[in-house]
Image: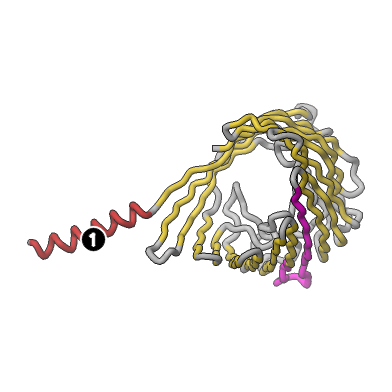
């Protein structure tokens, strides 16, 4: 009997040790307010001004081995309003992401963002409660991105960081995202690097979707620069996409994208944001706007912005929002 109980008790003790070493974290944010979009819908029953909202909850499971290898998994619950109608959306889980971290190495598997999506200054400083203006609006290539409300890709990314230098490479086999018009069996891969020297950060990435059923291989090369000073930070973007699909108006989108953004800290509590993005192709989307964030304390901020959106040769649309965001 003693021989039987001892291994059972030892096993239970080991399980207890693992359980103590594991961790479950909850984090996220909520936001709500009013959003205006000029000519939001052709439906006369849909107002230009709607209630905008988002609830986001991240669930992270974390465990670490005795050797210092950290394992993480994340799923997200998120609910948003419908931009087209203003109706409230239902909350739902997204696809899982799994990560392994050890010193400067990181491996992500599952619903991940690729090397381009994870560029720290790709979108720059985005004004508005909904961050509706960004410097990368002229980019038309559909790069691999983390999905908050769907299954996402089943892909892999490797990252290595040493001192101020960082490398990333990602791969999505047989991607089901056909927005690049590369065919249903296309493979998508990204590579990128980032280097920080004093107050300057430079990032570069290249991505390509290799067509399987069509003779098309869309690609994107992107360079960003960021400079940080006492009260002012600014970013620049320059990118080149090729073999990208036509926009919704049937216009060409291949060409050079460019953009700029800034953040000015007007006081300890208030920051001013501004951004501009455009491209050389007739079908590129132009965005520009300005906004402000005021810190109310306790992880709560008052945010708002106003700007203009224009797709290709379509008429421009005025957009604005204001509301509250609180982190938890």
- Nearer to us in this view, 219 or 277: 277
Quadrant that contains the C terminus: top right
Q: Image point 82% across, 65% down: which residue?
A: 243
Residue 177 image-quadrant placement:
bottom right
- Nearer to us in this view, 198 or 293: 198
Q: Is residue 8 visible?
A: yes
Q: How many numbered discs sit on the rendered protein?
A: 1
Query: Is residue 212 inside the magenta stretch?
Result: yes
Range of residues picked out in magenta: 207-229
Query: Which residue does the numbered mark 1 point to in the structure image?
Result: 11
Query: Would you say 114 lies left or right of 5 here?
Result: right
- x and y percentages locating residue 300 in the rendered image: 61, 32
Secondary element under disc 1, as helix, strand or loop, is helix
> Is 176 situated above or below 42?
below
Q: Badge 1: few (under 14), some or many (20 or more) residues near its Cα, within 10 Å?
A: few
- x and y percentages locating residue 20 in the rendered image: 34, 52
* Chosen colour scheme: secondary structure
Q: Image point 83% across, 59% down: which residue?
A: 238
Q: Image point 72% across, 54% down: which residue?
A: 121
Predominant SS of the magenta segment: strand
């Amino acid at each position: 009997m003693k021989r039987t109980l001892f291994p059972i008790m030892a096993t239970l003790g080991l399980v207890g040790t693992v359980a103590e070493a594991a961790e479950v974290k909850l984090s996220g944010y909520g936001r709500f307010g009013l959003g205006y979009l000029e000519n939001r819908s052709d439906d006369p029953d849909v107002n230009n001004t709607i209630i905008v909202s988002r609830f986001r909850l991240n669930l992270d499971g974390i465990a670490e081995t005795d050797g210092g290898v950290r394992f993480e998994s994340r799923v997200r619950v998120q609910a948003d309003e419908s931009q087209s109608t203003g109706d409230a959306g239902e909350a739902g889980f997204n696809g899982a992401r799994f990560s392994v971290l050890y010193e400067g190495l990181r491996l992500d598997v599952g619903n991940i963002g690729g090397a381009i999506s994870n560029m720290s200054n790709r979108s720059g400083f985005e004004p508005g409660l909904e961050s509706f203006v960004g410097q990368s609006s002229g980019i038309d290539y559909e790069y691999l991105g983390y999905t908050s409300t769907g299954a996402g890709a089943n892909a892999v990314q490797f990252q290595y960081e040493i001192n101020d230098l960082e490398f990333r490479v990602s791969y999505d086999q047989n991607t089901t995202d056909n927005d690049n018009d590369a065919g249903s069996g296309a493979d998508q891969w990204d590579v990128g690097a980032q280097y920080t020297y004093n107050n300057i950060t430079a990032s570069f990435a290249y991505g390509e979707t290799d067509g399987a059923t069509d003779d098309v291989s869309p690609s994107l090369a992107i360079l960003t620069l960021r400079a940080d000073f006492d009260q002012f930070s600014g970013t620049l973007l320059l990118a080149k996409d090729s073999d990208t699909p036509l926009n919704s108006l049937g216009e060409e989108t291949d060409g050079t994208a460019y953009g700029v953004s800034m953040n000015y800290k007007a006081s300890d509590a208030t920051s001013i944001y501004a951004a501009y993005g455009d491209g050389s192709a007739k079908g590129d989307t132009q965005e520009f706007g300005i906004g402000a964030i005021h810190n109310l304390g306790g992880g709560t901020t008052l945010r708002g912005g106003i700007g203009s959106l224009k797709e290709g040769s379509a008429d421009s649309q005025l957009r604005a929002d204001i509301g509250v965001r609180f982190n938890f």
